[in-house]
Image (cartoon, coloured by chain):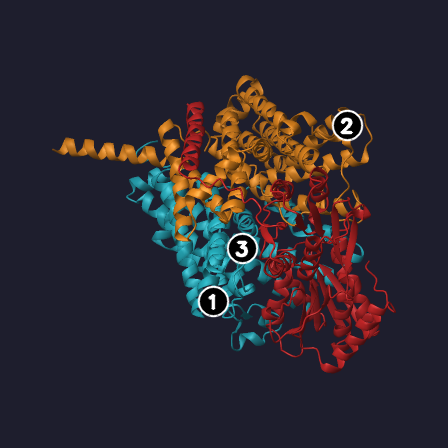
Chain colours: A cyan, B orange, C red
Amino acid sequence: MLSTITNLLETTILYSTPLILAALGGLFSERSGVINIGLEGLMTIGAFTSAVVAIHTGSPWIGLLAGMVAGVLLALIHAIATVTFKADQTVSGVAINFLAAGLSVYLVKALYDGAGQTPVVNSKFTDWAIPVLKDIPVLGKTIFNTSPITYIALIMVFVSYFVLYRTPFGMRLRAVGEHPHAAETAGVSVVKMRYIAVLISGALAAIGGASLSISIGSEFSATTVAGQGFIAIAALIFGKWKPFGVLGAAGFFGFSVALSLTGQVWGLTEYVPSEILTMLPYVLTILALAGFVGRANAPAAIGKLYEKGSR
Amino acid sequence: MIGKLNRNSTLFSSIISIVLGMLVGAIAMLLSGYNPISAYGALFNSVFGSASDMGETLRTITPLIFAGLAVALAFRTGMFNIGVEGQLIIGSMAAAFVGLKLELPPVVHAIVALVVGALAGAIWALIPGLLKAIRGVHEVIVCIMMNWIALFLSNYMVGKVLSNNSDSTEKIHPSASIRVDFLTDLFDGARVHLGLILAILTAIFVYVLLFKTKLGYELRAVGLNPDASEYAGMSVKRNIIFSMMISGGIAGLAGAVELLGTSEYLSINASLPGTGFDGIAVALLGANTPLGVVMSSMLFGGLFNGGSNMQYVAGVPFEVIRIVFAAIILFVAANFVKQLGSRKNRKKKGEKASA
Amino acid sequence: MQMKRWLGSLVAVSLVATLAVGCGGNNDKGTAKGDFSVGLVTDTGGLNDESFNQSANMGLQKAKNDLKVDVKAQESKKDDDYVPNLTRFAKDKRNLIWGVGFKFNKALPEVADKFKDSKFAIVDDNLGGKVPSNVVAVTFKDEEGSYLAGIAAGKTTKTNQVGFIGGITSPLVKKFEAGFTAGVKEANPKATVKAVYAESFTDATKGRSLAKSLYDGGADIVYHAAGGVGKGLFDEVKTRQAGKYWAIGVDMDQSRLAPEHTLTSMIKRVDVAVFEITKQAKEGTLKTGTEVNFGLKDEGVGLSKSSKVSPEVMKQVEEYKQKIIKGEITVPSK
């Protein structure tokens, strides 16, 4: 029984980690009023860069850092397009996805002699056991003995909450996303806040991508991210644009996946075909939304172009 | 979001945007040691080269027009239908079912398959529409989830219902096919089919619906300002549901057309086909207007089909095309050229004023 | 306004086109050179998928070097690309055109029907037994190789539990499962095989989760036939004690993914098949309109050379191999 729970929890964590990070990234951007449908692309570029740099430097930390830089640079394009040039935010996000998908695979081919994926990342993140805490039943083996990126993800939930709700910076950021004109009147630079928020989203989503290529997995290919950026967007909305909401939504989705996978090992496929069992997380998410969660209110100024002084 | 895109762009700036996009691609090629001139030569050769190349380009364009229209129509009502992908899969699945399991006379069979495909897509889109209207659940999440459910459902159906435990179904009955010899011969064997004509008709339908009917007026009004529309006596909920169903119907039709015309069989899919996501780009680049969608599909389809020829002839990885396309979208969306121009002008004016 | 803008775009595209073509654009459509030319189209996995496409390409390159034939390979991006990609080679008048993967089972006969002058070959599908007169269907007895992997696993397991991770449920993947299960049971009647399916060929995280569940559930050896999903299996086994937990690779020698933990790999010699068939086609001895089935006997399937299987077990594996070749054992494929 205990081992079953441990196993479920481990899989949940494995699945939730990239989602939490990417969704938190989306959170910063969207709370400032900039839709970020480009999370998939930001994750992709993060996964690619971290893998390549980790391979060539032998350090997952340098890889992670480089991945974040790449994520920030790509997000900068999104920020320039949407904030400065006032491009439609959804269009720009879609372009970011195309760009990242094209660029990363193109570079893999260019770097590794036409290969479809990077070599194996041997210097990847290994699990860290936290002294004392690791001996707690169930939790010890799962939450307190896991990849550094998972710790980063969990810590970032708290940090995001603190930054958004307990610091002047966070208040301004949220104000810019809800009432940009009022914020501007109060002396907050809407443009500056949105730039910062979008860049943070690039860094966080890139860490999420890196978790797929240098922590959970150990290579980058065209299918490394495979739609997780879009699931992260779903988790962001499901979590009602709140840090702990995101944690809950990503955790819920991860747990549903864990159920559908371990369900097979328990032998559920005797009764339900595995194709149907695989639908479980997606169906459960819809049911949860329809039954319990319901209406989600996006930040008021989301997606709206901001023109100084216009109303 | 709607229609704001490129409101004041000019002929000049879109030409420059495309050229700049290709320039970005050229730089990428140069940096990695490919010859951009021969690469682009190969690309255009295949777009305008032979009849069969042109035919394959048209075949690529067909589903893009449908997908783009589906996304654009929903956008007009303020709905982000990111679920075109799944509605398309379900449309294909339903059309395959009709094409394989029913025995009907020619023409009738094809029409029934198309209608059932469209209906299936509409029903698939009804779920996010209803949940949005009744429970206020954000359509984007439901659509994303429905995409994956559609994929697994379709794979299950291929193996367990539409074939005897196989990876793909048999070919559909010829009576359900929408390939016609006339078009195939015209394009030297390329798989151009009636779907292209249906796509154009659908574009006209969407135009008439949106701009010439009361329903269309309401759909757009709800998209522009839901509160005011409600106040004016329109039912926002009803319009949301209509919008999603029509959008899903078009997406379902896309899937049906692909199945009945291009592939003529259904097979297990390892991943989402991506046409729905391409449709988002097409719709937005086409400023959510039917004509814009058709035009941007042509650009998109031409680049994509030409891209594989570019890989064939010049050995340049296909991914360059994605980079080029992303750059074009960004340049057009950001109205880059026009804005640069006006900035310069403003600066000049400012200098004069201060002088 | 919209209209004007887009007409403008089209004018621009045509302009650039004319320019590009005009300034010495390369009009060479890759027309085949030499006496005998071969084209190869991959499925959506791409040329370097570390799986059957890559293996097929290795065979193609060997043919280029050893047989001095002209070769060219083309990747497919979508399932819709199969017909145009095959057609392109056919219009090039290539003598032999390969479609790699069962996904070509509708596209290849369709194109072959239009271009009777070329010969075609499909990998991994027998076209339902109806092979057109200018096509050869190349299939592999995956179940035989998997059976040997099962023997190795059954004799090596200490917990009497082994696992199998499949990609998307399909007859092709079931062949691997059936052969493997039969092998395990034959070698060790006490052992049980737990088979799970990821319903994906790409999601490595799913592979890792499934592997975790299988190992935690008591299995000490896990075999996979799940493409990219299987990468997750190696990621998981690497976190466990070497010499106690094992993974078995598929298609190619996968030991580089986890050198200390890879018991062996079931290799599928698509390269051998591509080379052999190409050679026969060049020499004019290729029989078309039929299925060619590569099994243990033809070295079409087998276990990898690099292996951590103990010598005693390896001896038994070898015995079973001979029995299958002699026809004393028929391995189930369903």
Q: Which residue is mark 3?
A: A19
Q: Are marks 3 and 1 on the same chain?
A: yes
Query: Height in image: C11 above or below C192?
Result: above
Q: How many marks?
A: 3
Element under disc 2: helix
Residue type at mark 2: give it: His
Q: Residues within 10 Å of mark 3 (few under 14, many from 20)?
A: many
Closer to us: B34 or C134: C134
Which SS class for mark 1? helix
Regarding residue B25, the answer to whether it shows in the image is no
Residue at (88%, 69%) from the top-left corner?
Answer: C328
Left or right of residue B198: residue C14: left
Vertical arrangement, residue C52 with respect to residue B187, above or below:
below
Chain under callout 3: A
Report, in whole angstroms, how far the alpha carbon at label 3 lies from the one at label 2: 45 Å
In the figure, residue C84 lies in which quadrant? top right
Residue C197 visible? The answer is yes
The disc placed on residue B109 is 2
Q: Give the residue displayed 66% in from the left and 54% down from the top.
A: C200
Q: Residue furthest left?
A: B355
Chain under disc 1 = A
Q: Nearer the viewer, residue A56 or A10?
A: A56
Q: Disc 3 residue type?
A: Leu
Q: Is residue B319 left or right of residue C165?
A: left
Question: Quick one: quadrant of the N terminus of chain A?
Answer: bottom right
Crowding at dot 2, Cα within 10 Å, few <14 / some 14-19 / many 20+, comes out as many
Expressed as whole percent of the image width and height from the top left, the position of residue B167 reads: 74, 49
Residue B153 % position (x, y): 71, 45
